[in-house]
Structures are given as structure tokens and as C-alpha cells.
Amino acid sequence: MAQLNTKILKYCEANGVSSVDFRNEVKLKDDGDGVVYIHEWNLGIAEPTSEQLETYNSVATTEENNHAIRRTRKSAYGDIGDQLDEIFKNIDDWKTRIQSIKDANPKE
């Protein structure tokens, strides 16, 4: 299950809001039992119901999974300076290495 903040972002994107400030516009709170909920809503669109947010669970989960894959890929790619040196020395080897990283870590 996707995190509440990711579902909120997807809800907002679908309703024409491109970014959300989670310190001022939308504040989340933990009820003490690990359940996170919307504590404050200060956006120019209607606050979503739990049911509305749940409809964004699938797309939010995909977003979170792809974010994790991007972090893994970035780490595996290595330092950009080293990559430039690798490209200069043998671009085909670099292409092969990068493709193997992408193949090992496919996005959804």
C-alpha cells in the first residue's frame, strides 16, 4: 500500500495542482497507532475523502516503486565524472554497463 503523501500528490496532480507543500498547505499527523491522516488541508481544491485517496493507491504504489528503482539505478551508475571518463575511453562498454543496470532494475 502506498503512503498517504504519495496518494495525496497523485490526487492533486489529477486535479490540476502540480506541487504540494507538506509543511504549510497539507499537514499530516500520526494518530499514535501508526495511522497517518490529513490534519490540515489548505489547498484550493476539495480535501479528498479516504475513499477518493484509495483510488490512487495503485498509481501511487507504482510511483513509489519507480522512485526506489531510480535510487538503485543512480547508485549503480556511479559518479558522473567517472562515467564521463568511461564514455571517453570506451562508449560502447559504458552503454553496455548502463543497459545492464537498467535491465536489472526495470521500472513498472
Image (spheres, rainbow, N blue to C red):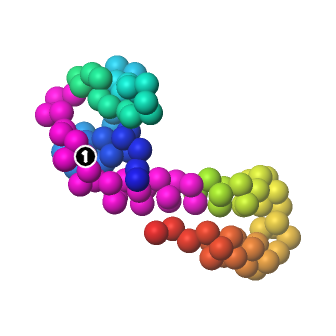
Badge 1 is on which residue?
53
Q: Position of residue 93 (x, y in %)?
A: 79, 77
Image position of 54 with respect to 58: above or below:
above
* Type of secondary structure dominating the magenta stretch: helix
Residue at position x 42%, y 60% from top?
62
- Which amino acid lies under the numbered mark 1 shown in the image of this protein? Leu
Residue 26 in view: no
Pick the residue in front: 15 or 55: 55
Judge by depth and name the residue closer to the eye, 32 or 14: 32
Numbered disc total: 1
Q: Residue at x 62, y 53 (%)?
A: 71
Instruction: Left or right? Give the position of 61 relative to 87.
Output: left
Q: Position of residue 85 (x, y in %)?
A: 83, 61
The verdict on residue 38 being magenta is no
Q: Is residue 98 left or right of residue 51?
A: right
82 over 90 or under it: above or below: above
Q: Is residue 101 left or right of residue 20?
A: right
Q: Which residues are magenta?
A: 43-69
- Is disc 1 placed on a helix, strand or loop? helix
| Residue 57 position within the rendered picture, expressed as x and y whole percent measured from the top left | 32, 54
The image quadrant that residue 83 belongs to is bottom right
Residue 13: % across, % down: 27, 46
**As displayed, is residue 106 above or below residue 71?**
below
Q: Please report the residue visible at 30 percent of the width from the left and 41 percent of the height from the top.
A: 8
Quadrant in which residue 28 is drawn: top left
Q: Residue at x 33, y 37 (%)?
A: 19
Query: Could one spot residue 80 in this view of the protein?
Result: yes
Q: Is residue 66 magenta?
A: yes
